[in-house]
Image: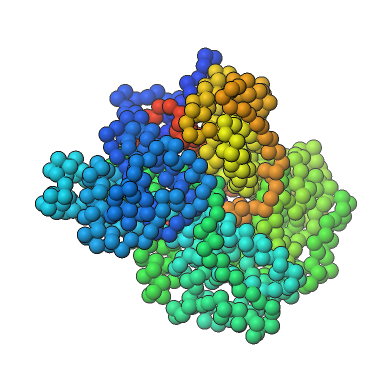
Amino acid sequence: MVAVPVAPALSRFAAPAALSVAALLLLVLLSFLPPGPGRRRSAGRKMPPSPAGAQHAESLGAGKAIAVLTSGGDAQGMNAAVRAVVRVGIYTGAKVFFVCEGYQGLVDGGEHIREATWESVSMMLQLGGTVIGSARCQDFRTREGRLRAARNLVKRGITNLCVIGGDGSLTGADTFRAEWGGLLAELLKTGGITAEEAQRSSHLNIVGMVGSIDNDFCGTDMTIGTDSALHRIMEIVDAITTTAQSHQRTFVLEVMGRHCGYLALITALACGADWVFIPESPPEDDWEEHLCRRLAETRDGGSRLNIIIVAEGAIDKHGKAITSDEIKALVVKRLGYDTRVTILGHVQRGGTPSAFDRILASRMGVEAVMALLEGTPDTPACVVSLSGNQAVRLPLMECVQVTKDVTTAMNEGRFEDAVKLRGRSFQNNWNVYKLLAHIRPPATKVGEGTGREGPTGSPQCHPNACPCPQSGYTVAVMNVGAPAAGMNAAVRATVRIGLIHGHRMLAVHDGFEGLAFGMIEEIGWNAVGSWTGLGGSKLGTKRTLPKKYFEEISANISKFGIHGLIIIGGFEGFTGGLELVEGRARFEELCIPLCIVPATVSNNVPGSDFSIGADTALNTITNTCDLIKQSAAGTKRRVFIIETMGGFCGYLATMAGLAAGADAAYIFEEPFSSRDLQANVDHLTEKMKTTVKRGLVLRNERCNENYSTDFIYNLYSEEGKGVFDCRKNVLGHMQQGGCPTPFDRNFGTKMGAKAVAWITGKIKECSRHGRIFANTADSACLLGMRKRSLVFQPIAELRQQTDFEHRIPKEQWWLKLRPILKILAKYNIELDTSETAHLEHLTRKVLVPEATL
């Protein structure tokens, strides 16, 4: 992860200061069409008045033309970006042109450059690759080729170019823009264009979006296609794991990435690999000894397999390539293990894009259009990128230069600088992986305890469990609330990082009930070895709150000597944490540091933009919607009503609507009336007159107590009679199941590691004369992602930000993305463009030091 995948990536999203889309789209009406009389508004949310003289986005592109092309290697999600550029461009009043076959189509002109329509990008969202084609073009590298390309654009009145590709493609676009004036002068001199055409096309605006599975472009946490490639890789790794266990084999898996180790690194984190080779940080000269010792230790600990991940550009410290076959030969010769090599190859580029990539690409496409239309002759070429969960604009050539600096650093043997230049996200991932894999685990004996203690069980130290820890502290970890994919990855990281810190780690089964009834056991390094890819909750989880068990919980905290508690769970975990803090006044045993890690498919925990498990649920919904849309496309004139989970939180419905291309998404946060329902029916009726004869409507399960899924289905069926028919699907608990996505595995791992680092420091801070006494507000915190950072926030302060009746935060960042859903579904809504974004600068960002884990 997803991050966010979003990012990661996958990933995943809107900065008021740096992202004009947020400023442009935030002031939109909060419904698909103007609300009827008596419509309810969410508490505390008022619509700002439109400033006088504000230019409306519907006319922002009038008289302008935009061309969009995909260049270089293809990546999943490129089609979603093309779709967004086309539809938002048309929405603003601009003409939009496809440039087929990348720069080659720009040079050749003719039928390679053709005008796009709204319907021409229908059904593109879920397709991998790029439907407008991509090609490596030698002609564009020559001035003669660029002259032909310039003439083709000028003749069509195109002065805005959106390029989706890697660093080479974007560098070519910047060169094209820099030469534009000279190219026009030469064309005018030779009669290639008229003086009027030259004047009308006096400057060229360039905006780039990075589409590459390698994630090798500096300045963005996630490029379009990276999260989808990780999905393909993890599907294969999970499949290989089962056969490797059966035969006690070692597998060496080689992944793509050219000279960037991101795919290999995240894969290693997501599957708990024994070793990873990446070009940015080559192993020490005696790596062969360390690798074999590591593999042997894993086998001695009871594992039946070993997984080694190799980036295709892996090298040693002297620049010599490290190949998969070389590693296999080493393992066979020194250890005698049955070893296989699997080179994943181009399967990583294929398949349908993940939900993260679709949302990322759609957001980037909207922002790219706005950046183009706001551009002036003095505006530098920019690239739209992702930082944390914020979309930002950065100067294109700054990013290209830093990307080149990484290669230079590696060529010069400055590998520490190379890791730093990759950015904070890469640096943090690498630090976490080194902690979990490269540091030798505490000494253990075979047979360490993994069984569950009964309700009356004592805090047994298993005869063969870990020896006494160095720190002298005991930290307990538990799951609370509904199960969410990625919980196990977070527990695994928590346990192993805790052991590395020297703590005695305890596993609490079945939530607060287990804490009250003594269902607590010591847990060791090998007990959590294979948990990363498992769905659900291995510890067991319940929604029970602790208040009625304060006496029993206090007794067990004292009995088991617990010095700190990490709660991985949903809204119940947050509420339970608040109750424990309230109980400190009566029970001194509750005065221990407390950390909440959000994990719920609903993504409704205050203090965090993302929760562990939400990305997996989102992909489940999106994949189901793809199948349903395929069915609707085959039968024609059919509308599907889909009910999603989330309680009162509309996150899943909204983001799945963006990822699946829904026509509407009904949520609690955005109240709607019968008039709105009728307006949506009318909209679908008009849609059936086009070539796109299908509809998809999502409904959050608790969006309205009266307008139930059955009610909406019956209404649509009646009002659409003779025009379209309806079907309904309630997805149910399948949204809580399945293996976690790469984003949730990675996100859970990093959150667990960060939580342990914080609680270790807090225990030491609250330690006095051998006793722990934590009674301040900052001794009970929630770890959450806020915009671009993982931050700890006192849960007492988050109380004011919470709507406890409806179990949602009062402010939710993703509501700013709802206008994008509506625009892409062809609703007429007003946008205020009175605020403009400014460029950030990459050079100030790349060398920010990482917080120590």
For the point 32% across and 42% down, which residue is it? Answer: 66
At 61% from the left edge and 74% from the top edge, which residue is drawn? 341
Taking depth in this image into account, of 165 and 115 the one nearest to the observer is 115
- Determine the residue located farthest toward the right in the rendered image: 456
Q: Quadrant of residue 373?
A: top left
In this rendering, would 55 be left or right of 575? left
Pick the quarter of the image with the C terminus: bottom right
Image location (x, y in percent) of residue 756: 63, 56
Q: Nearer the viewer, residue 654 or 138?
A: 138
Q: Is residue 851 visible?
A: no
Q: Going by the picture, which residue comes out furthest to the left?
A: 189
- Residue depicted at 70% across the width and 62% down the height: 530
The quarter holding residue 276 reads: bottom right
Please state which of residues 347 and 706 is positioned toward the viewer in this rendering. 347
Q: Is residue 300 above or below residue 569?
A: below
Identified at 84% across, 47% down, the residue is 517
Q: Would residue 287 be seen by someone viewing this image from the given angle?
A: yes
For the N terminus, give its image quadrant.
bottom right
How many labels were placed on the picture?
A: 0
